[in-house]
Image (tube, rainbow, N blue to C red):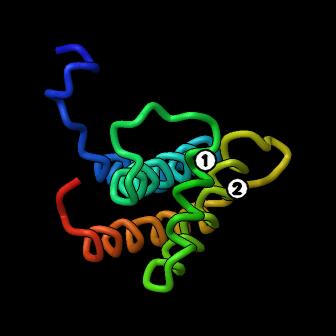
Amino acid sequence: MTPHTGQHKFDWEHYIKLSEGLVLGADESQWRCSISRAYYGVFCVARNKVGFKNKKHKRGVHSKVINRLKSKKNTMNMGLILEELKTFREQADYLEHEKITQAVAQDKINKARILFNDILQFYGRNY
């Protein structure tokens, strides 16, 4: 099946589950990957829920999703948490001089899991 047919639907929760396994690893590379996967798992669900699903994504879609969440009283906290996770994802992916500990990674994964569930509860479970 080709990716553009629209017939296959990936479950973004698998990224959250993957991150929960990676954080148990013994080295910083696994902790960095765990933060990145946790962020993308929750970001993709948020992106789909706030109206950017199936659109050709141009530069800045991450900020657009975060700002959309932050712009409404009922979802402002979700936007703030997603913004925090994005900051740590960027640190984990790009800043080799910044140390990522297992405790930090676990904290971000916990926040991502809670945010993932909150988004589905608020917007509905279908994604």
The local crowd at label 2, few if under 14, some if 14 to 19, many if 20 or more residues have their Cα within 10 Å, is many
Residue 74 in view of the camera: yes
Residue 7 percent coordinates (x, y)? 14, 27
Where disc 2 sits, the SS reads loop
66 left or right of 6 in image: right
Report the residue marked by disc 2.
Answer: 100
Residue, x 32% and y 53% (percent of image)?
A: 17
In the rendered image, which quarter is residue 119 located in? bottom left
Residue 70 percent coordinates (x, y)? 56, 73
Q: Amino acid at mark 1?
A: Arg
Q: Amino acid at mark 2?
A: Ile
Residue, x 34% and y 58% (percent of image)?
A: 49
116 left or right of 62 in image: left
Residue 47 percent coordinates (x, y)? 42, 52
The extreme right residue here reads 97
Marking on residue 32: 1
The local crowd at label 1, few if under 14, some if 14 to 19, many if 20 or more residues have their Cα within 10 Å, is many
* N-terminal-most mark, 2 or 1: 1
16 left or right of 75 in image: left
Residue 45 percent coordinates (x, y)? 35, 54
Residue 21 in view of the camera: no
Task: Answer whether labels 2 and 1 touch (C-beta < 8 Å).
Answer: yes
